[in-house]
Image: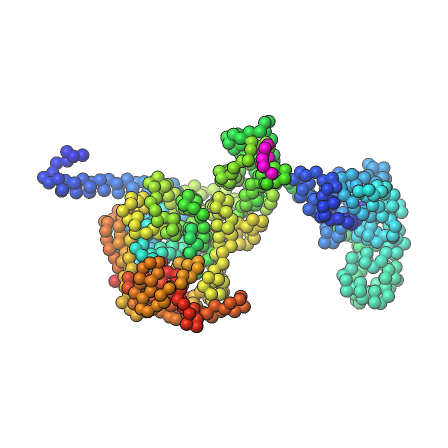
Amino acid sequence: MKRILCLRIENESSGSAGERRAGFSPTASDGELKACPLQAVAARCKQFTPLVGLDPDVFPESVLLDITHVVHLFGGETALVQRIAAELSRRAGSWQLRSAVAHTPSAAWALAGYGGEGKMGRWGDGETRRHEDVSISPSPHLPISPSLISALPLEALRLPEPTVALLHSLGVWQVAQLQALPRRELSSRFGPELLDCLDRVTGRLSEPFPAWNPPRQFVVSWSAEFPTARRETIEAALEHLVRRLAALLTHAGRGAMRLECLLKCAAGPAPFDKENWLQVAVGLFRPTAWANHLAQLLQVRFESLQLPGPLDAIRLVAASTAPLELRQIEMFSEGQKRVSPHHLSGLIDRLSNRLGHTCVMRVRLLPEAQPELACHYRPLVLSRDVKRSDLKKLGSPGAKKAPQKTGPTHLFPPRPLRLLTQPVRLPGGIEGQFSFEGRRHRIVGRVGPERIETGWWRGPAVARDYYRVETATGCCYWIFRQLPAGPWFVHGMFD
Amino acid sequence: MSDVPGPHPQACRRLQIEALRQQLARWEEAGALQNLRERPVLLERNVLSSGCPALDAALPEKGFRPGTLVEWLFSREGDGTATLAFRTAASIVRAVAGASRGGAVVVLDRSGEFYPPAAVAQGIEPERLIVVHPGNKADHTWALDQALRCPAVVAVVAWPDALAEKLDGRTFRRLQLAVEQGGGLGLLIRPESVCCLPSWAGVRLLVESLPSNSPYGRPRQMRVTLLRCRGGRGEQTINVEIDDDFSPGSPAGEVKMT
């Protein structure tokens, strides 16, 4: 018989300042857990049992523990729950904790959430730290008492909202009332999931345990014996760290998508961070665990870095990781090495990290008549996450050319290769010639007008007549006249 | 070297220059072959078409050899030099399409005036384009070097803004070595004013626009002068005609030799 303990945590101050104050140490690993109190609780519960369950979608606000074979180590279920409550209250803020032990996750969850009023312990700042009010199913060796389940309200069954509302309107409020109804008709009337939910709580239907493991942290750190500003020492330390981190990542089969290098300076000024941690982040285009590449990227960032003071410690974190792509080595590829995708991703990583993410762009064409809006730039390396589907498209032969992407541009007359960021007004207007950038150009030929009237929904509407004009020297300009009968502008050159 | 016998100092000098030129050509040939053997073979073919038959015919190898820097010198704004450069890039993209993985085209544009739809209309798919906006000249040179060095990049187009001034010999040589390692083409668009400066580029072309003598300004007429080319005679002039008013669907306009 399985014994599942459900801890239902109602966090009064989730994410508020009060909770953060209450006892989490400011290390990076806790910093991440701070963002998700449930995961923090689950991580702490790992010391009591190897099987901790967490699934916020199925069991909201709850952490489940499979305590089947560990109870005797703690001297009984009540004692175990007391130990857990004490552990949680020691380290964390003010929570309301309800707990229940049952034979299935659903039953434990239902009892912890709805198993009678007044059975609630409260821990935290200034509150009582006792926790005798824990609802435990009567005996550790028996299945759960049917009367406890029968007394539960319908909400405890995790039914869909409309079903609950329908049952309420029919006067069914408690599980006991539901159990009194004939099973076969329940299924045809309310769908099969009603019976499933009910059977999971009563134990007729077995249920998988939503096992959870804490995400792996890829952190390596180094601290100097005494603060140093020697670049050689720092670089050597950094390279050593990168190799260690790469080894960690390779072992886990993951590649870094974002590296954060935290530098603690002994006498640094405050503005970077309150704790004098200077952060250098490196974003990657494709996950990698290749130490040389990571070291190279960090080196590029370090070249332009001014340390505010001697360095005390370095902490290197793979803040975001993704599964590593493994590629089989070709045996007979000696003579003709093929271009592998890491060549391009390596180039993009290097460019993005030295020049900045917003300086290395991909191009998207939009079906837009207004020339300056018909083209959209997007960074190739996003600061947070990269869509892997985008990644595959780049640099591969464009076999699947989307017609709607390039279609509209083919319908327009030719566009100039050079488009001025701002159209330049021609002061004298146009009478067979125009002067631009201090030179007079005589017009000998023209194509047009191409009338573009659009954008009224963006504010001032755009109304222009575009001409492609050829000057006496054979140069081609793209000029337009603001309608109606407004001034003339140069917008681009057919360079 | 002044003891070379000869009846006339002028003729003597000409002979000397010719001998030196041949020697240089042999060295370059050897060096290029060496590099070809060492670098990853990106492009199966030995010569890349410029996308312009008239120009191909004038080049000694009937195209550009992979791993070459090509300088396009423009005489005026709007004379169509960049159009020719992008036409070359598009022709390379067409050549590698489906042949192997990779095939990105990197455009370095400091001014932010490059307009991608025109390049797409030439036949370069937007998925292949990577546009880089370097902040200063040092970054521009560095990015150019990195892009040329990458075997997955088939063509790097450097927009004129940062190459208007002199490139020092060492930097230029580094770029040349980078492109030989990468095996793509480096298309550097530079103003005519750098014509008198020394160059490490394999090919140097001067482009001048000619009046089209048509009321619609097309087809465009250009005169391309082959100022320098590995293994070829210098100072060769050809006329190129480009009609870029193509119909929807066709990859590029008709190019005729006149």
Farthest residue toward the front?
A428
B72 to the left or right of A12? left
Figure coloring: rainbow
* Residue located 80% across and 65% down the image: A165
Question: On the rendered image, what quadrant is the C terminus of chain A found in?
Answer: bottom left
Q: Does residue A431 appear anywhere in the picture?
A: yes
A188 to the left or right of B234? right
> On screen, B44 above or below B249?
above
How many numbered marks, from 0 up? 0
Quadrant hosting residue A193 = bottom right
* Residue located 81% across and 47% down the image: A97
Q: Position of residue A389 (x, y in %)?
A: 55, 54
Along the viewing direction, whichever of A465 and B27 lies nearer the viewer: A465
Q: Position of residue A28 (x, y in %)?
A: 65, 40
Farthest residue toward the bottom?
A484
Q: Position of residue B173 (x, y in %)?
A: 34, 41
B69 in the magenta segment: no
Q: Position of residue A342 (x, y in %)?
A: 49, 45
Q: Point out the stretch of residues depicted in magenta.
A: A262-270
